[in-house]
Amino acid sequence: MELQNVLTKGAVPMMIMEILRSGEAYGYEIVKEITRRSAGKLEFGQGTVYPLLYKLEEKGYVVSKRNTLPNGKERRYYRLTEKGLNELELSKKTWRETSMAISQVLGVNPAGVMACA
């Protein structure tokens, strides 16, 4: 499985929910925030993020509302739900455990984890 598919299935939804933990945002803001937080190493287009937002909404992890801008255009804002927050915490725990296990097999230290003696 190629890296893009792996990220899209697990890591990107988790990153979206983490960004929404701070408050509501619309898709383009989420795209830009992922790029900003990753120092430009991760860049996803709106074509990747919006389908994931729709899936997260179907699962009840996020809710959305439409706001009309002063210029008359509509923008859809997303917000993390309590169910989404619980899923985010579980996903982050699983990510940490999996990352540590893979790092041990590869003989490398994951970022921010101290080496065991």
Image (cartoon, helix red, strand yellow):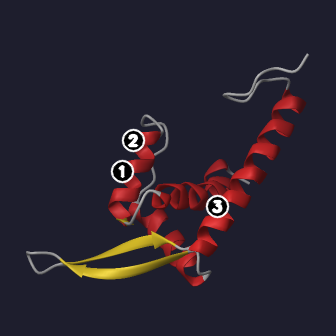
Find residue 44 and report its horizontal and vertical position in percent. 45, 53
Above or below residue 79? Residue 37 is above
Residue 32: numbered disc: 1
Q: What label does residue 88 carry, if any? A: 3
* Residue lying at the far left of the rendered structure: 71
Q: Residue at x 59, y 81 (%)?
A: 60
- First along the sequence among labels 1 and 3: 1
Q: Which residue has dot 2 on it?
A: 36
Q: Which of these two is toward me, 93 or 11? A: 93
Kindly identify the residue that appears in the image at 67 percent across and 28 percent down. Answer: 111
Q: Residue at x 46, y 61 (%)?
A: 20
| Percent coordinates x, y for residue 12 in the rendering | 57, 56
Above-or-below relation of 115 to 50: above
Q: CA distance from mark 2 to mark 1?
A: 6 Å
First reached walking from the N terminus: tag 3 or tag 2:
2
Which image quadrant is residue 56 in? Answer: bottom right
Which image quarter holds the C terminus?
Answer: top right
Look at the numbered discs 1 and 3 and tell me whether their residues touch, using CB distance below 8 Å.
no
Q: Residue 19 — which label? A: none
